[in-house]
Image (cartoon, helix red, strand yellow):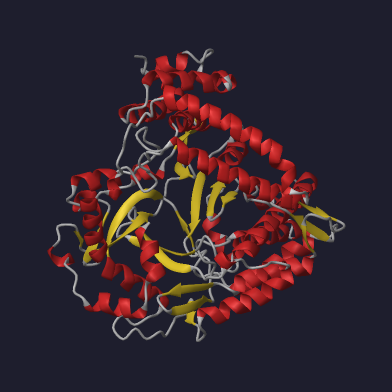
Amino acid sequence: MQHNDLLRKLTLTDVRNIMQTPCACPSSSFLYPPCGHVITGDLNIIQNKELRELLQKGASYREPVSRSWTSVFSDVKESINGFVTNMSHKHKIKPSLFDEWSKRFLSILGNRIDFYATQLTYRHGSFVQTLDKPHIKHTLSQLHNSFVFAPADKAANNIVVICKRHYLDVLMTELGIHPTSLTCSGNVTYTPVNKPAKEIIDSHICDLEHFDIKCSVEDKCLPQFFWIPKLHKTPYKCRFIAGARRCTTKRLAVIVNLGLKVVREQFKKYCAAIQKNSGVNAFWSINSTAEFLDRIRGRKVSSAQVFDFSTLYTNLNLQSVKEALQGVLDIVFKKYTHICISKNKSFMSKKAYRGYRCFEKGKLFDAICFIIDNTYVCFADQVFCQILGIPMGGNSSSCYCFLIFCEFTYMMKLLNEKKLGLAKMLSNNSRYIDDIAVVNYIFFHKLLGDIYAPDLIAIRSGNDDHRVAYLDVLIEINSDGLHTSVYAKVDDFNFNVVQFSFPSGNTPLRLGYCIYSSQLLRFARICSDKEAFVSRARSLHLTLSSRGYSCSMLIHECQRIFYANRLLLNKFGWFSPKQVPVAMAILP
């Protein structure tokens, strides 16, 4: 996305020039009055029809690429050589041992290519990409002079056009930079660092050696700071993100994240043992919609409420996070001395194992603290350190463990105080990241201050105890009992959201049909009523067929996925997958 390129190359001189140049927003018909600048998801702002139609297909859309069979063979050969290098290094064997295999593989590949070169017609034909056309490049360059292209929050495939001056002004306000003088005073969340980025990077490289991590050349950088607009809010709001595919702390953050997943599972087992003896569930955290549905289905539900932490990433006191993590680790490491981590498998153990990154409790805690305390972001030539909250875009497992420990501590307090009735009512709660679903207890708002830290603000979503949306589930409670259907937050947005793939793109056709079948499966698992399922399924079918996907192939995929999952159809009163397309009224 273009906002990444802008920020990566930005200097304070560039910022000064942009801020001193008046923008043309006041005279634009796409002006957003609350901020006085252009922020729009309406791509009619782009006058070039060819470019506009391309961008309307979404940020993830890729045009077909015309490639010669020679270049295909060359790329596969390069990948094979890379594979041989990696395998020989991993298993400590000579690369020459792969020579016969490589030669045979490339021979078969060459024969296949010779056959397809004469027999196969490329489905897109000869194709010149839109963005390679000179007049499109010129148009796009002119747009980039005045605007920033960024993804929309909760609709990352949608492209939002934002006034460049306003985009930088919002970033500077958040970081505590004066928009005119560009002096950096910072604020309670971000403090300017009077060190060059290179000095911080060199310090990180030295500190990472303690964790046996070597920083690659690509990782010798700090995250960029950017924001994306929340167009579904009134007025529009911003989501600030400290993001980087590569940075000094990335490798350690990935390892810590894998380790904390194991810690979470071990803590879950500990809470399960308590529940077995007391009947009280002190572990509210869930991983998926399926886990939430398992908790509420088959249970008599009289009310449901949903709360959302609006300040989880911005107001969280880092010292409180560390103390909670220490409490979780103390419990998890009671029976174990090490946590062994690898990309494919991680586990707790009583000894260190070869081939794994093994951490004792103290070393794992030090690694977590290092990640928390070294949250640096770059803007232009300035470096800032985040001293409050956990950054969006980084490893957030530590703050989730913080919430787990808060909930566990409160539930144990209720048990110790013999408040078994309240403890069992709260045992129905579910929390996915920062969203809490409370079932059969309507006074949860009075307990928030006792359970969580005072700097965490949880806001209730809606006021109806009998109709709430949680994750991608719409819950409705009436005299007939509990009913669930699919909820899509994008349905409430005041703009069209670009979803799913296009058959005209540079992706396998099969991908679109697989997306279709997986979505049908998700709809069937969530919906408790046939009518709700049929409505969603038919809408999806019409969307994909209107884009050019084969109607007969979509019907085939529908029947195929339900032949493999027939039991899901029982609740709808169907006994054969052939009844599904009939009910959806999509037969040709």
Q: Quadrant of the N terminus?
A: bottom left
Q: Nearer the viewer, residue 59 or 300?
A: 59
Answer whether residue 181 is visible to the viewer in this image. yes
Q: Quadrant of the C terminus?
A: top left
Residue 17 screen position, x and y as percent = 26, 78
Residue 259 screen position, x and y as percent = 70, 57
Residue 440 screen position, x and y as percent = 56, 44
Q: Could you tell whether 166 is left or right of 508 in the image?
A: left
Report the residue at 34% width, 45% height from top: 58
Q: Is residue 167 above or below residue 332?
A: below
Q: Could you tell whether 78 is left or right of 175 in the image?
A: right
Q: Nearer the viewer, residue 347 or 9?
A: 9
The answer to which image quadrant residue 186 occupies is bottom left
Number of numbered discs: 0
Q: Could you tell whether 127 is left or right of 38 in the image?
A: right
Answer whether residue 34 is visible to the viewer in this image. no
Residue 366 screen position, x and y as percent = 71, 71
Q: Nearer the viewer, residue 264 or 485?
A: 264
The answer to which image quadrant residue 580 occupies is top left
Q: Is residue 431 above or below residue 389?
A: above
Report the residue at 51% width, 78% height from top: 197
Q: Residue furthest left?
A: 27
Report the residue at 25% width, 55% height from top: 137
Q: Could you tell whether 383 is left or right of 324 in the image?
A: left
